[in-house]
Amino acid sequence: MRVLVTGGAGYIGSHTLVELLGQAHEVCVLDSFANAKPVVLDRVRSLTNGKISLVTGDVRDGSVLDDTMSDFAPDAVIHFAGLKAVGESSRQPVDYYDVNVSGTLALLRAMDRHGCKRIIFSSSATVYGEPEYLPYDEAHPTNPLSVYGRTKLMAEHVLTDWAAATPGASAVLLRYFNPVGAHASARMGEDPADYPNNLMPFIAQVAVGKRAQLQVFGDDYDTDDGTGERDYIHVVDLARAHVAALDHAAAISGARVFNIGTGQSYSVLQMVTAFRAASGHPIPLAIAPRRAGDIARMQADSTRARNELGWQATHSLDDMAASAWAWQRGNPDGYGD
Ligand code: NAD
Ligand code: UD1
């Protein structure tokens, strides 16, 4: 297939490009480089010997989208482009709604103008909010606790309504749990712009000596060891879910939501233990107050993805820690300047 990948230079997008090229799909990346560096695409090229067309532009820009779709004529779009920092989303809500919701609308309008009828969308498990039961299945009520989460849910609604109203159209909405880890080559990985918001990149920066210690946000949750539990998923498993979703989008009409997780949850302290084993670094830590908006435990029921996409995660926690460490050790400054 010819696949337009918005945000393809980002963390999850770049790993997905490797999997798409590995399956002989043709790809075109549209990225503004708001949160990525062009060199990542050179790394993807060198790992795959694949050809990547690149358009540097904003997903909200209809004329850029028109030119891209005229030139490339995609069969399907994978839509990663978006803003993702939860804390920032509460300080800059208009920016978040604009990029995440208006960006999706602009993309759908362009797809309509060019007759492209399949889209895979990066949603998040954060749309569920406080669990009424666990593991979350796709029927769990949605009640996001952040602006970021509300932008994702709103985009899901837009895509669902578009797919219902557009004959022959399909939208596959992937609700990612917590993506971590890096490509096995250690040439690609997560490269947070400044201060890491998420656990795994923070631990990795402690291990490589960039940060003195990890702050553990709360040890009094109702979990086995009192620290927060999450369903961490290796980014390569997540990337492969997109390849499976492309095939599914070609087979269905309408919208379908899938949880993309492992079904297993690990605590902050279990993540630290795994990273200590992978890196040999002691990873000093201190217990800090709970972080506002955090949930005690999140865990996916990914039965639907297994049954309908034929996809399931294969990487272990040790694979996640070892690959994140290999990337961080080999690239202490990420992709550099
Ligand atoms: P990322 O920031 O690494 O990638 C996003 C990419 O989109 C970047 O390359 C950025 O330059 C680009 N971009 C941003 N705004 C743009 C715009 N207006 N026009 C064109 N390109 C633009 O993030 P990621 O971790 O790879 O996440 C990809 C998607 O998955 C995002 O939509 C994110 O919300 C979603 N998601 C991520 C996580 C996670 O933990 N990483 C979890 C759930 C969902
Ligand atoms: C965060 C976002 C969520 C987003 C997800 C993936 C919040 C409130 N939620 O979720 O919307 O979908 O990232 O991008 O920001 N932790 C520490 N110390 C740290 C960092 C994290 O103890 O320095 C703990 C957290 O309290 C949590 C766990 O580690 O228990 C995982 O945190 P994180 O990686 O930020 O992911 P989420 O909280 O799931």
Image (cartoon, helix red, strand yellow):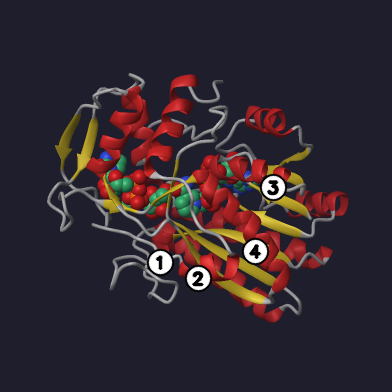
Using a 10 Å C-alpha cutoff, classify the residue at mark 1 as few (fewer than 14 neighbours), some (14 to 19) or many (20 or more): many
Question: Dot 2 lies on which element?
Answer: helix
Residue identified by numbered label 3 = 20
Q: With respect to residue 70, does 155 lie above or below?
A: below
- Pick the front one: 288 or 302: 302
Q: Which residue is mark 4?
A: 105
Above or below, 126 against 194 in this view is below
Q: Secondary structure at mark 1?
A: loop
As drawn, the label of residue 301 is: 1
Image-based side of 299 in relation to 215, left or right: right
Gap in Å between the C-alphas at discs 4 and 2? Answer: 27 Å
Circle nearer the N terminus (4, 1) = 4
Tell me where residue 270 sits by quadrant.
top left
Label located before the other in sequence (3 or 2) = 3
Q: Which residue is mark 2?
A: 304
Query: What amino acid does circle 4 point to?
Result: Leu
Is mark 2 in CB contact (under 8 Å) with mark 1?
yes
Label 4 with label 1: CB-CB less than 8 Å: no
Q: Is residue 140 left or right of residue 78?
A: left
The mark that comes first in sequence, 3 or 1, is 3
> Which quadrant: the C terminus?
top right
